[in-house]
Image (tube, rainbow, N blue to C red):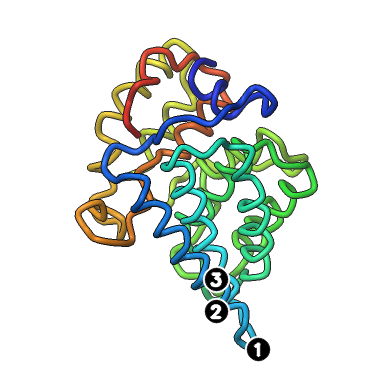
Amino acid sequence: MGLFDKIFGNREKIEKTNIRDHHKGEKYFNKEIVRFSDIIKETIQETNLNAFNYWAISAKYQQIISLKFSLGIPVFQIVEDYSSALNYYIKGWDEKEATYADMLLMISLGILFQVSDGDFEQLVEYVRKTDANKKLDNWHPDGLIWFLLNSRSSHQSKATEILFPRIYGSLYEITKLSKPEAESALEKYLEKWYNLHKGDPWYNTHERDRGYCGYWAWEVAAVVKVMGLNDSSFKDNIY
């Protein structure tokens, strides 16, 4: 497994690492972690929290996870933040809204953090409810999401369509390849990964004074883990 096995594998062997990010420094990330933590505290103190509030709190925890990873904090120390993110994420399910990026991120991190079966089933149920929701326009079961979920869930899906094919279509196609072919294809995919996300709100945020959390291809790492690929040819890719 190489790099991903080293980072996300045996927790007892993980030691504090140097900063992982290539754009910002320790002072920046520590400041942003405090800022997002304060936002969470302020939001929780509000009364009558609704689905949007829960989703917003989860989104902040997701950003804190990336910030801490960018800073170089060992993964086993970040898992608690994922538990909090998942708790609020599940509470934030809304029949009128669904955000693909958050869903893919939470599933990918759940796989990489090796969460409990119970926690993973919460993600499965979240997706199943979303897929069955008739109030969402232009939503259907997604092949990449279910490829990841099928790796651990007893509720299998044969979904093959991709909701955002321009960005994730080629990654999904990689999941159908043999291991050697997938390893070669992923190396090429990572070279264009950042520019594929040019329309995302986090694109080029490293040029700002705040709001940048790091550029991490969590979904690619999750695919590597599920497929059991050797990442030695692309372990030095900055994403």
Three-letter amino acid code of the residue under disc 3: Ile
Label 3–label 2 contact, CB within 8 A: yes
First of labels 1, 2 by sequence position: 2
Comparing labels 1 and 2, the label whose residue is closer to the camera: 2
Front position in the image: 91 or 157: 91
Q: Position of residue 20 (x, y in %)?
A: 39, 34
Q: Residue at x 73, y 54 (%)?
A: 122
Q: Check contact, mark 1 vs mark 2: CB within 8 A.
A: no
**Residue 42: numbered disc:** 2
Looking at the picture, does residue 198 appear above or below residue 9?
below
Q: CA distance from mark 1 to mark 3?
A: 15 Å
SS at mark 1 in the image: loop
Q: Amino acid at mark 2?
A: Glu
Image point (56%, 64%), residue name: 58
Residue sitting farthest toward the front: 27
Residue 199 in the image: x percent, y percent? 25, 56
- Please say if the residues under marks 1 and 3 sit with CB atoms less than 8 Å apart: no
In this figure, which residue is indicated by the disc labeled 1? 48
Real-space Cα separation, disc 1 to disc 2, in angstroms: 13 Å
Question: Tag 3's secondary structure?
Answer: helix
Return the mark for residue 178. none
SS type, badge 2: helix
Q: Is residue 115 left or right of residue 170?
A: right
**Residue 28 at x, y percent in the picture:** 34, 53
> Within the image, what quadrant is residue 113 found in?
top right
Disc 3 target residue:
40
